[in-house]
Amino acid sequence: MMRLPKMDHCAPKSVEEASSLLKEHGPEAQVLAGGTDLLAACKLRNTRPALLVSLSGIEALRGIDFHKGEGLRIGAMTLRARPPWGRSTTVSRMFGSAPSRLSC
Ligand SMILES: Cc1cc2nc3c(=O)[nH]c(=O)nc-3n(C[C@H](O)[C@H](O)[C@H](O)COP(=O)(O)OP(=O)(O)OC[C@H]3O[C@@H](n4cnc5c(N)ncnc54)[C@H](O)[C@@H]3O)c2cc1C
């Protein structure tokens, strides 16, 4: 089994904190969401970021909201399998309650 190379990892709690880490470290840092692609690429040594900035602790990036005049916002860390439909009755009305309606 291939091992991950040594990398620093941080888990900011806000978009602002994540943005400032990415700005500070430039191309040496990479955003980590679920890690499906990125961690496999790291194991294969196709990429080797010095710092992984995980978005998993940023609650503001989860969820689906609809605001009249602004439109639909799907957070970058919203899970396809279990979107939080309950938060917005407008979204539930527009897309129904079954995740299968979000086929891609
Ligand atoms: C073995 C394997 C099987 C797969 N099977 C499927 C499948 O069956 N169906 C399917 O649809 N896809 C599949 N994929 C593709 C994969 O699921 C998608 O590419 C998915 O988008 C990866 O999501 P992630 O959250 O794990 O991303 P990560 O691996 O965490 O990140 C992927 C890239 O996006 C960047 N990134 C992540 N979040 C952000 C952000 N908010 N802003 C800017 N950049 C960001 C990362 O830095 C990285 O470069 C597969 C991939 C692999 C390796």
Image (cartoon, helix red, strand yellow):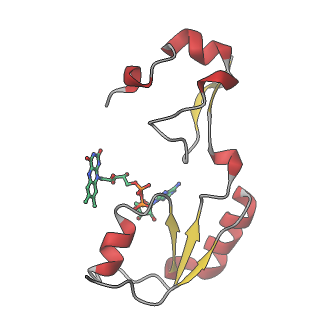
- Between residue 17 and residue 70, name the one nearer to us: 17
Find ligand 1 in the image and state its quadrant: bottom left
Give the x, y percent position of residue 47.
35, 79
Decide if residue 39 is on the left or right side of residue 28. Answer: left
Task: Identify the image quadrant of the N terminus.
Answer: bottom left
Residue visible at 38% across and 68% down in the picture: 38
Decide if residue 68 is on the left or right side of residue 54. Answer: right
Task: Name, please, the residue furthest toward the top.
Answer: 93
- Between residue 104 and residue 1, name the one nearer to us: 1
Q: Quadrant of residue 73?
A: top right
Give the x, y percent position of residue 85.
59, 24
Give the x, y percent position of residue 92.
58, 15
Give the x, y percent position of residue 27.
50, 78
Please tell me whether residue 34 is drawn above or below residue 77 in the rendered image: below
Residue visible at 51% across and 82% down in the picture: 28
Residue visible at 31% across and 31% down in the picture: 104
Please tell me whether residue 79 is drawn above or below residue 97 in the rendered image: below
Q: Quadrant of residue 5?
A: bottom left
Task: Name, please, the residue furthest toward the bottom.
Answer: 6
